[in-house]
Image (cartoon, rainbow, N blue to C red):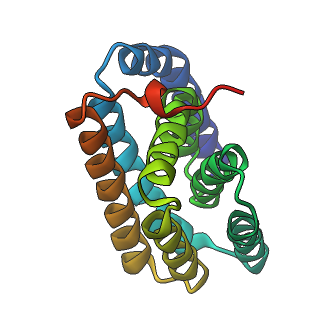
Amino acid sequence: MAVPIILQLIFTAVLLNIYFPLIIFQMYNSKIQDALQLRGALESKAAFLAAQNCTPLDAAELQLIIARLDSTQDEKIRGDLDRDLHLKIAQISANPLILSVLNASAQITENMIVGIRSYLMQKNNDAPEIDSQHTRLVQAITNNDAPLAEKVMNEHMHTIEYLLNEITSNNLTISDNVQQP
């Protein structure tokens, strides 16, 4: 019984060492929409798996992130919490490959998250749709409702994609919406 587990770990390590750097290299040389599509697929599966695996401790940690998001108006902090929420969901999914790819791509998507949140703040003075999706997502995960968690994450990723398209159609770039410290 231990031999198949060891072989699986060795196989995973080989895949990560050989293919993972190639995937990340390819992501850096792709359009932001391509990276967003990959992220959407991974995040939807992560949400589904997280809902299946969520423990009471995980639920408390997710709810704490949501409470912190609700309690601050500082968009830099909110952007960091947004990223932390998504990475926590990936961690709860218990799929190390999903977590690794999302962690590695965080640098690519971090500017996108901050830029989209800044764009929403300029446009609406808040981000109610994204905040509502985060809250509904955490509720689905903590209630162990995997299909709903996946559905809400899909909605969330479509919202992000829509906003990204809106930004680019207005001839703005993500960096135009990122306020420098």
View extreme (bottom): residue: 143
**Residue 18: where, in percent of width, then height?**
48, 15
Q: Residue at coordinates 36% horizontally, 51% vertically from top-left?
A: 160
Image quadrant holding the C terminus, namely: top right
Q: Left or right: 181 with respect to 31? A: right
**Residue 83: where, in percent of width, then height?**
61, 47
Q: Residue at coordinates 49% horizontally, 74% vertically from top-left?
A: 132
**Residue 143: where, in percent of width, then height?**
57, 86
Task: Using the rendered view, name the quadrant where residue 29 is placed.
Answer: top left
Seen in the picture, residue 151 relative to 56 is either above or below; the reply is: above
Between 100 and 5, the one nearer to me in the picture: 100
Seen in the picture, residue 127 relative to 106 is either above or below; the reply is: below
Q: Residue at coordinates 38% horizontally, 21% vertically from top-left?
A: 27
Seen in the picture, residue 170 relative to 31 is either above or below; the reply is: below
Seen in the picture, residue 99 relative to 12 is either above or below; the reply is: below
How many marks are shown on the rendered structure?
Answer: 0
Task: Using the rendered view, name the quadrant where residue 58 is placed.
Answer: bottom right
**Residue 162: where, in percent of width, then height?**
26, 51
Q: Residue at coordinates 57% horizontally, 43% vertically from top-left?
A: 99
Task: Using the rendered view, name the quadrant where residue 80 is placed.
Answer: top right
Between 5 and 173, the one nearer to me in the picture: 173
